[in-house]
Each structure stands twice: as structure tokens, then as C-alpha cells.
Amino acid sequence: MLPRRFDERLQKRLTHLPNHPMPEVDRHAASRAAVAARRARAAVKKDITAGERAPSDVLAVAFADPQSVEAGLRVTDFLTSLPSIGVTKLPQTLERLGISPRKRLGGLGSHQRTSLSRFVEEFERKRGIVPQPRLIVLAGPAGVGKGTVAAAITAALPQVHLSVSATTRDPRPGEVDELNYYFVTHDEFDALITSDQLLEWATVHKTNRYGTPRRPVENALAEGRPVLLEIDIQGARQVKLAMPEARLVFLLPPSWDELVRRLVNRGTESEEDRARRLETATSELAAQHEFDVRIVNDDVTKAAQQVVDLMGINKELHNER
């Protein structure tokens, strides 16, 4: 509740505002957005009912990204999209889960999320639903913690295939070929491009080229292993074109000030380099809505867990600190 003096000041200002209706263009734009959102949510429900999408995958996206279509789905619509639950069973199911029928997936509390996740896990187990291995592309501005999150995932889950990039630069001391990078010549890199063996590639600082080999990614997925790519935003766009089934995940900092602090504390760039990276980060942050899911990295274990959930892996990570 506003303090009385602020409330009176606000009311005084409101009485002097002209009583104009919302401009037609705004009403129309809002109406179109609402219709698009309803259609998108209906498409999610249809995919679940048709068995084209695992219910646990819908929950993973809804819980990770409050701006997602999945987060806006009502719990009642989500539950009734499951073949075993109809209007008759819905009230008792909601009561059992302790969830109000007015709730949306993105608005559930931690206990409600846990109870619903366990309910869905049991549902999928009984029906033999096994989520397919996913290709997750993790991108975001420098300093956001992509490498730290990726390292936390692969340390806890060795079955996750972390893609290794090819590069034309020389190995640095301690780097091992095929472990840190595939070190190739410029001619070999040209051959990879010509034969369509790269999912994405780019020239960095107008000198050396980097790219993601296609074959190791496809082989890992064929073996039933989820794949994690930690690349830049331009590369993520290329991967989506090459493999539309890839899920693009944008890692966000808790705030702009925190991103600046992380870059400064890394101590790996000069002041000029940091300024350049921050300028680049501004445009990169503006591209976040091109991605399928947005995750805020305010806690490494939490962010890593959300990525793991998006992979369809039923595994709880633990904070080692």
C-alpha cells in the first residue's frame, strides 16, 4: 500500500489526465499478441496429447523460463492434456497435488513444482515414456558463466557429450588435440566447410577460425547421449538452421552490474578488451528472445540443474560448496 502522501499525489495527477481511450493500434497489437499466446499454448497441449512431446519436457521449460509459452499454461490445461486425466479426475488430482486450479505452471511454488514433477515422472514411467536425447546449445554474453555451468554438468554427468570445437589456431601449452580442440590447418578447415561437416563456424578477431564438427554431435545423439554445445550467439543461430530440433538456451546474468563484476574479477582481459566485450554484451542481451529458453545464472548449481532438466535427464545435482 502506498504512503498516503504518494497516494494523494497520484490521484491528483490522474484527475488531470485526459480521458482518452487506448490508441487503436495498441489495442490491436495487444489483441494479436493475446491470440498468438493462446494458439501457442494450445499447440503445446496438442503436442502432449499426441505424444509428440514429453510432459516432463514441458515442465522443464516452464520452470526454467517464466517468459516461456509453457510457463503461461494453466495447470488444469496441462493435466487434462494427459491421456489418463479428464474433467472428472481433475479436481481430485489438483487436491492431491495441493495446487489451485487458477495456477499457471510458471507461477507454482517450489513444493508444488516438486509434487507435480513427481506426479509426471510416475505418469511417464507407467506409460514407458522416455525423453529423447537432446542437443542443447548454451549461449550468452562473455562473463555470464557458460563455461562454469557446462563444467558443472559434465563433471556430474559424464554421459553428457560436451562438443569439442575445431580451430585453426595453434595449441596453447597444456592443450591436447581432440580433448580441448580439434587443431586443424586452414586447408583442413576449408574442407570441413565444403563438405558440410560443420554445424557452425566463425572467424574470430579476423585471424583464426572456430567451428563445431557435425559428426561427433550426430554420433552422440544416435548413441542416446545428450549433447551440450557451449558457443556464441552467432553460432547458436547457425546450429538452429542446421539442426532445427536443437534447443537454444540463453544464459542471463542476474543483473548488468553483476555481469560487469564477473568480467572484471576474471582478470583475463585488459580494460580495453572488457569495454569491447561489454559493448558486445549489450547487443547479445537484446537477442535473448530468439532463444527457446532463458535461464538466469544467479546460482551455478541451479542453472546447471535447469539445463540438465531440459536435456531430459532425471538427475538431481548437488551444490558442492
Image (spheres, rainbow, N blue to C red):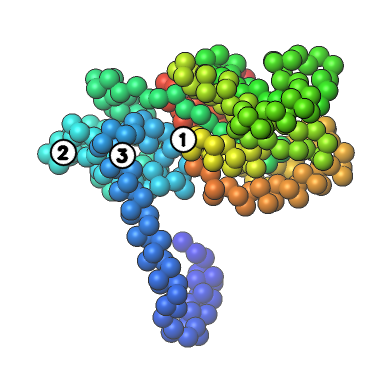
Residue 307 in the image, given as x and y percentages of width and height: 51, 30
Q: Which residue is mark 2?
A: 86
Q: Which mark identifies residue 245?
A: 1
Q: Is residue 125 at least partly visible in the picture?
A: yes
Tag in front: 1 or 2 = 1
Going from the N terminus, do you reach mark 1 or mark 2 first? 2
Q: Secondary structure at mark 1?
A: loop
Question: Label 2 sits on what residue type?
Answer: Gly
What residue is at 40 percent from the left and 44 percent from the top?
A: 71
Going from the N terminus, do you reach mark 1 or mark 3 first? 3
Q: Is residue 174 above or below residue 193?
A: above
Residue 176 in the image, given as x and y percentages of width and height: 75, 14
Question: Label 3 sits on what residue type?
Answer: Asp
Quarter in which the C terminus is drawn: top right
Horizontal side of residue 72 vs 147, given as left or right: left
Determine the image quadrant of residue 125: top left
Tag in front: 3 or 2 = 3
Of 31 and 199, nearer the camera is 199
Tag in front: 1 or 3 = 1
Measure the alpha-carbon separation of dots 1 and 3: 15 Å
Q: Secondary structure at mark 3?
A: helix
Q: Secondary structure at mark 2?
A: loop
Q: Which residue is mark 3?
A: 47
Question: Label 1 sits on what residue type?
Answer: Glu
Residue 305 in the image, given as x and y percentages of width and height: 51, 27
